[in-house]
């Protein structure tokens, strides 16, 4: 039997961390904007990166969606802050869902957060001309 939302969901819903927006045209900012087709909810997660170290120095979000999506994005911003950009790509929605004890029907809400993190990193890399293809090209030139 499901006994209602975990206190962490309620806490992050009532006191969401890092709500806000960065200028998406700032070259240090990566923006991930994703939507859940199942419910129409939308999440925007942004990261600010220190170009030299590749570290995420700040993060913020705006979520138009359910309480679980808001809580998931709030947790996601907390988790990515201070981490290396490459490291946050391994954050799984299941970890977020577990942290918040989300019920199975709310798994897709945490999926939005995982997708948004990935999209934000990708956006930054594209902006910086550091797409995967570029990386491969650089590697090839380096090893050639
Ligand atoms: Fe769709 Fe939560 S119900 S994101």
Image (cartoon, rainbow, N blue to C red):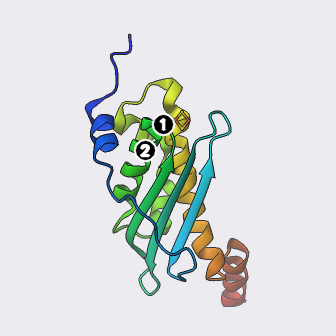
Residue at 50%, 59% in the rendered image: 45
Q: Residues within 10 Å of mark 2 (few under 14, many from 20)?
A: many
Residue at 46%, 52% in the rendered image: 91
Q: Quadrant of residue 37?
A: top right
**Residue under numbered circle 2:** 70
Q: Mark 1 and ligand 1: say if the CB distance to the nearest ligand atom is below 8 Å.
A: yes
x and y percentages locating residue 94 in the rendered image: 47, 38
Residues at circles 2 and 1 in contact by the CB criterion of under 8 Å: yes
**Residue under numbered circle 1:** 66
Residue at 48%, 36% in the rendered image: 66
Q: Secondary structure at mark 2?
A: helix
From the viewer's perspective, tell me whether residue 116 is left or right of residue 6: right
From the viewer's perspective, tell me whether residue 131 is left or right of residue 13: right
From the viewer's perspective, tell me whether residue 21 is left or right of residue 101: right
Q: How far is mark 2 from mark 1, CA to CA? A: 6 Å
Q: Please name whichever residue, 68 or 53, is drawn nearer the observer in this view of the structure.
A: 68
Q: Quadrant of residue 144?
A: bottom right
x and y percentages locating residue 36 in the rendered image: 63, 41
Q: Secondary structure at mark 1?
A: loop
Q: Mark 2 and ligand 1: say if the CB distance to the nearest ligand atom is below 8 Å.
A: no
Specify the label residue 134 is tagged with.
Answer: none
């Amino acid at each position: 039997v499901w006994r209602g939302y975990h206190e962490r969901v309620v806490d992050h819903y009532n006191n969401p961390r890092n709500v806000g927006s960065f200028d998406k045209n700032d070259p240090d900012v990566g923006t991930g904007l994703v939507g859940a087709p199942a419910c129409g909810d939308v999440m925007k997660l942004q990261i600010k990166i220190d170009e030299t170290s590749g570290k995420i120095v700040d993060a913020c979000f705006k979520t138009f969606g359910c309480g679980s999506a808001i809580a998931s994005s709030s947790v996601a911003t907390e988790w990515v802050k201070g981490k290396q950009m490459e490291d946050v790509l391994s954050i799984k929605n299941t970890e977020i869902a577990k942290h918040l004890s989300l019920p199975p029907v709310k798994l897709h809400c945490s999926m939005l957060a995982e997708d948004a993190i990935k999209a934000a990193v990708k956006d930054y890399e594209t902006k910086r001309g550091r797409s995967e293809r570029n990386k491969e090209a650089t590697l090839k030139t380096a090893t050639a």
